[in-house]
Image: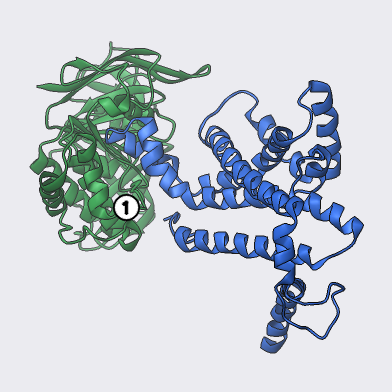
Chain colours: A green, B blue
Amino acid sequence: MTNVEVRSIAKNYGSVPVLTDISTDFTQGSFTSLLGPSGSGKTTLLRIIAGFIIPDQGNVAIGGNDVTRMPVWARNIGMVFQSYALFPHMTVNENVAFGLARRGIKGEESRKQVERALELVRLPGFGDRKPKQLSGGQQQRVALARAIVTKPSVLLLDEPLSALDRRLRQEMQVELIRIQKESGLTTIFVTHDQEEALTLSDKVAILDRGRIVQIGAPTEVYERPKTRFAAEFLGDTNFLTGTVVAGGIRLANGSTVAVDAPLPATGSEATVAVRPEKIVIRDVARGGKDTDRSNRVSATISSSVYAGTALTYEAAFDGLSFKIFAQNSDARPHSVGDVVELTWSPLHTVPLEAAA
Amino acid sequence: MKIAARFYIAAILAFLYLPILVMMAMGFNESPLYELPFSFSTRWYQALAGNAPLVNSGINSIWIAVATSIIATVLGTMASVALSRRTFRGKTLLQLMLLPPIAIPWLITGTAMLVFFFYSGIGRGLHALLIGHVALAIPYVVLVVGTGFQTVRADLEEAAMSLGSTPVHAFFSITLPLLYPSILGAALFAFAVSLDQFVISYFLATPGFSTLPVQIYSAIRKGFTPEINAISTILLVGSMAVIVIFALFAKPGGVSDKR
C-alpha cells in the first residue's frame, strides 16, 4: 500500500534546477534510502516531503491526502536531523514529550508513551538528563525516540548517522533497522553513504543532478545498475565499451565479451559494467583451474593492494585497466607482472543506458 | 609571574572601584567641602529629601531607563530575529547601518537629533528624550541578541515544527528560552545606555524636565554639595542590586549551551 507519494516534483533555486520531475511512491512500512552525492537534490526532496520547502511544481501526498500546501506542523511527520537538534534547555523526557504535548497528550499518558519510546531506543532511565550529558550515540537515540513517539505518518531521517564514528554508526544501523521494523513506520532516509543505503533499505533511490536515475531493491540497483552514474556511485565498477554484435559486444582489440541481457541494436556502441568482485583471476603460468565463466581476457597484473581479508588487483589489458577484488584464499597472491586470465560470467556483464 | 598578575588585577579593581568608594564615603561625611577627618553623618541624605529637582530628575532617569530598556529590547530583539533568521533585500546594508550609531560621538548624534526634532515638530521633553534613548539603545540590543542567535541553531526551530509547533510556538518555546540570557544582557545594556546618557538628554531636556546627569551637571556649575554624592550612591546601589538579581536568575552563559 502506498503511503507517501510524490508526483512530478520540480524545484528551482533561482535559475538553477535542484529537482526535475521527481515521481515515486513509498510503500507503507518500507525503508527507502535517497542516495546521491551532495548537490543531487536528495535533501531538498526530503525537505519537500517534510514541508519545509514548497515545490515549484508537483504534489506530495501522505496517507492519500494531498499535503503539498500543508505546513510542516500540520503534516504529522517525524524527523531526525543531522545534528539531532535536541532542545538543549529541556531534559530527555521533555524533549520526547514535546510532540505529544503539541497533540494534546499530557500527564500520565504522556509519561507512559515517553517511557515506552525510550525503552524502544534502549535508553530507559535517561529521562532526567540534559542532552549535553549524553554521548553522540545516545543523543541520536533520543532524537529517534522524539521523532517516533508521536506515531507519525512518515519518518524522515536526514543523514542521521553521519556525525557518528564508524563503529557507533554500524551499531546504530542495526538499531535503526530494529526500531524501524518494530515501529512499522514508513521511513525515508537521506544518505550519501552507498554501503549504508544498501545495508538499511528495502529500496534505494539513486539521485543525480535532481533526477532519480534508478530506484529498486539494494540487490537490484547494485547488481543491475542502469547507468554509468548508478554503477559508479554504488561501488567500484569496470566499464567496457564496444560495438554490439550478436550476444555481446566487440571491443576495440577484436575480442568479444558475452552479455546475457538485452542489448541495443547490432552495430551501435554500448557500454557494459562488470563489478570487480565478479571477476576470477586464473594464473596462466601456473595453470589454474578453468571455470565455466565464458568471458575471458588475458591481462597483466599491474598493481596489488593487500588488505588482510581481501586483495585489490589492477590488471592491464590492451590499454584498459581492470579492477578485481579477490578473497585472500589463494595459496599465493598474484604479483605484479604476472600474466593472468580474467574470467567472469555474461550474467555479470551489465549493459548500461547511454548517458543522458 | 603570579604575583605580577595579581597585582595587575588588584590595580584594575582599585582604579575602577576606589573613586566610587570615595564618592560614596563622602556622601556620609559631615563636611560640605569634602574635608577630612571623616565624621559620619546622614545630613546630606536629609538635605537630598528636600531637594526636589535632584530627586525628581533621579526618578525621571530611572523611569526613562526602564522604559528605554523595555522598548529597545522588544524592538531590537524583533529586528534581530529578522536579521538572523530571514533573508530579504537590503539585509546586509541594514546590518551595516546599525553599527555607525554606536561609533558616532554622542555629541554629534545629539546635535543631529535636536535639529531634526526641532524641524519635525517633535520638540523637546520626555517624549523626545524617550525616542532619542530608544534609538540610541536599539543597535546595542540588536548586536547583543544577534550574537546570542548564533548559539541557537536554526534546526532547533525546524525540529519543533516537525513535532507540531507553529513558527510562533517554536519561537516562544525553543528560541526565546535559549536567547533569554542574551536578551537579559541586552536589556541591561539598554538600561545602562539610557541611565548614562548625558549629551542627548542635555539637548532634549526642558527646564521643567531633566534627567539626573543633566541635573547634576547644572548643580555642579553652581557648586558641589555632597547631596550629589548621596543621590549618586542611591542610584549606584540600586542599579548594582538590579544587576546582581539579574545575574543570579539569568546565570549568564549557563542556559544557552552550544552543544
Q: Position of residue A151 (x, y in %)?
A: 15, 36
Quarter holding the C terminus of chain A is top left
Q: Position of residue A111 (x, y in %)?
A: 14, 49
Identify residue type, mark 1: Met
Quarter holding the N terminus of chain A is top left
Quadrant location of residue A36? Answer: top left
**Residue at 36% over, 57% down:** A305
Which secondary structure, mark 1? loop
Regarding residue A228, the answer to whether it shows in the image is: no
B62 relative to A337 in the view: left or right: right
Q: Nearer the viewer, residue B110 or B46?
A: B46
Subunit of label 1: A
Q: Nearer the viewer, residue A101 or B192?
A: B192
**Residue at 49% over, 49% down:** B151
Q: Which residue is mark 1?
A: A90
B53 relative to A28 in the view: left or right: right
**Residue at 19% over, 16% down:** A65
